[in-house]
Structure formats: C-alpha cells, structure tokens
Amino acid sequence: MRVVIAGGAGFLGSHLADALVARGDEVVLIDDLSSGTMENITPLIERGHLFLEADISAPFEVPGQVDAVLNMASPASPPAYLAHPLETLAVGSEGTRRLLDLADEHGARFLLASTSEIYGEPLVHPQPESYWGNVNSVGPRSVYDEAKRFAEALTMAHHRTKGTNVAIVRIFNTYGPRLAAGDGRVVSNFIVQALAGDPLTIYGDGSQTRSLCYVDDEVRGLLALLDSELVGPVNIGNPDERTILDLARAVLEVTGSSSPLVFNPLPTDDPTRRCPDITLATTALGWRPSISLEEGLAHSVEYFASLSRAEENGGG
Ligand code: UDP
C-alpha cells in the first residue's frame, strides 16, 4: 500500500510509518514540523519515502497513488494545544476535511486518530465507545476535545453521505521513545526530571488516574484497525489504570532516581480518571496490549537517557 500519514514526523505518526515500512508498505509523510521533527523520519527519507512539509489546514497536493490516509496531525500535549488553540481547532476541522477529500478522490481508506479526551470528565468508568462523554465545550481544553469530536462527526458524515471507507480510533494516553523531552506530557516530564535529579512535578494531589499504553502496542492496534473493515469508533489503549502518584513512584523505581516529588496546581478541567473499555478491540480486532507499564517505562528511560548522553557529547 501507499499510505499518506498526516503528522508523519510526530511521535505516533513516525512510529506508524516505521511499522508500515517494515511490513513492505510505502509512506508519504506530511507534517508542518510544529511538534514533529525531521530526526524522527530521517531514516525513512533516506530510503526514498516522500516528505511534504505542509499544514493540512491549508491547501496541499499529494502526487501519485494513495491507498490509505491516516490523520495523525494535531498538537496532542495539553501545553502544546493550549498554546495554539486556533491552530488546534483548524487542524482538527479543516485539516480533517482536506484529508477526507483526499481519501474520497482516491477511494482510499481513511483513519482518524481521535482521542480518549472526547470522553472529557467521564461519568461512566471505564469508558466504552458507546459512552457519549462529558466535555466542557467552553473550557480551555475544548480546543482539542471539540476539534476531535467535530473530526469524528465529519468522518461519519463523509462515510454516510459519500460512502467513504473510514475508521475512527480513540487513542488513550500513549508513551515511549520519541515523545519530545519538552513536550509536557506526564511520562516524558517524569522521566526527564528523574534522570536529571530534579523534582517530579505532580499536578494536583496525584490521585487522578490515567491508563498508559506503550507505543508499540498502540501502533499494533492502529494497524489492526487499518487492515480491518471496522468503522468504529474503537478504543485502543491499555486498561492498566494508575494514579499519577503511582506513576511517579514507578518512574523513580525504574530510573533508580531519588528525586523528590513536588505538588503543583492541577490544570483546568484535567480529567479525574480515564480507563478504556477495550472489549470491542479485543473481539473485533483480536487486539490487546502486551507490554507492561514497567517494561514500557524501562524502554522509554533508555531512550531519554541516550538523548541526554548525546547532548553531553555535543551531538544534540
Ligand atoms: N501531569 C502531572 N505532572 C506533569 C505532567 C502531567 O501530574 O508534569 C498530570 C496531568 O495533570 C494529568 C496526567 O498527568 O492528570 C496526564 O497528563 P498528560 O499531559 O500526559 O496527558 P492528558 O491525559 O492530560 O492529556
């Protein structure tokens, strides 16, 4: 297949690209490099895969055949989307519309990366796909949550009115190598802080929960969905739910760090708990995660430690 990946230089997009290329597919990577980096995709470009520097919320052209279109483009870290509210709304709405048109033009399968954020502050726990969510439409996080909810609505409208071959995945917190060190998400923050001997910054009292999925498991789930005929939405995430305080302790354990914990204010509308019900993914796709938090953290620590060694050696 020749697969277009918007957000292809980002964390998840570049891992997906690697997995597609490893199984023999060709990729076309589109990215405006606002949060993605060329380092993530240099080996793919050297092997002849096409990179287009473009913002998908403005017109862009993709030359040649297109068999699938994956929409992985958006700031995804709360500090990143809160710093770029209008761009986040534009990429989720206008960007998604342009990619759906591209898929229509080529009769390609379209996969939307949606998010557990569409459940907002969930009143149902764990969250099955049938739960409609509880989102504050005028709060600061709404720029991400509502952009993704709109993208889901647009995707379903294309499917219903034009017969577009679509799939929607709701991605729960995913972590691993290539999360940007300064990106602000909890796993990268805690690991970077632990390795530097700096305090781990817990927001609120740390009793809020997240369910963290290692990137290799997430990518395997996304490919299973891409290869299926399922429309979804389907939750792809690891139901191993932990408090943020437990996560901090696990990072200290894996790194062997004696960093202290500091408690900072909880961001507005930070969800209290989040855990995927993955019954649909297991029954319809035969997918379930297999990498434990401790194992995934160990791989991630290795990555961030190698980054800081490269910096010390002046390699950047
Ligand atoms: N968090 C934290 N310390 C940090 C970064 C995040 O305690 O340095 C908390 C954050 O308030 C949230 C959880 O960790 O409750 C996950 O945050 P992240 O930004 O990774 O993802 P989210 O699920 O909020 O999109």
Image (spheres, rainbow, N blue to C red):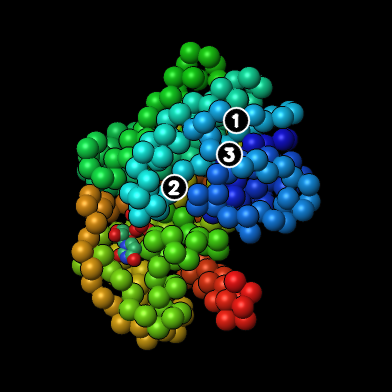
- The residue nearer to you, when weighing 77 against 159, is 77
Q: Nearer the viewer, mark 2 or mark 3?
A: 3
Number of labelled discs? 3
Tell me the distance, in whole angstroms, between the alpha carbons under discs 2 and 1.
19 Å
Tell me the distance, in whole angstroms, between the alpha carbons under discs 2 and 3.
15 Å
- Residues at badges 2 and 3 in contact (C-beta under 8 Å)? no
In the picture provided, is 278 more to the left or to the right than 21? left
Q: Which residue is mark 3?
A: 54
Callout 2 amino acid: Pro
Q: Residue at x 50, y 60 (%)?
A: 179
In the picture provided, is 167 more to the left or to the right than 126? right
Q: Which residue is mark 2?
A: 75
Residue 304 vertical position relative to residue 118 in the rendered view, above or below: below
Residue 127 vertical position relative to residue 69 in the rendered view, above or below: below
Q: Residue at x 56, y 28 (%)?
A: 59
Q: Residue at x 33, y 35 (%)?
A: 146
Q: Would residue 286 be seen by someone viewing this image from the given angle?
A: no
Image x and y of residue 194, in percent: 41, 78
Quarter-of-image position of residue 209: bottom left
Callout 1 amino acid: Phe
Nearest to N terminus: mark 2 or mark 3: 3
Quarter-of-image position of residue 65: top right
Q: Residue at x 40, y 26 (%)?
A: 153
Q: Nearer the viewer, mark 2 or mark 1?
A: 1
Callout 3 amino acid: Ala
Quadrant position of the N terminus in the picture? top right
In the picture provided, is 246 more to the left or to the right than 223? left
Q: Which residue is mark 1?
A: 60
Image x and y of residue 115, in percent: 41, 43
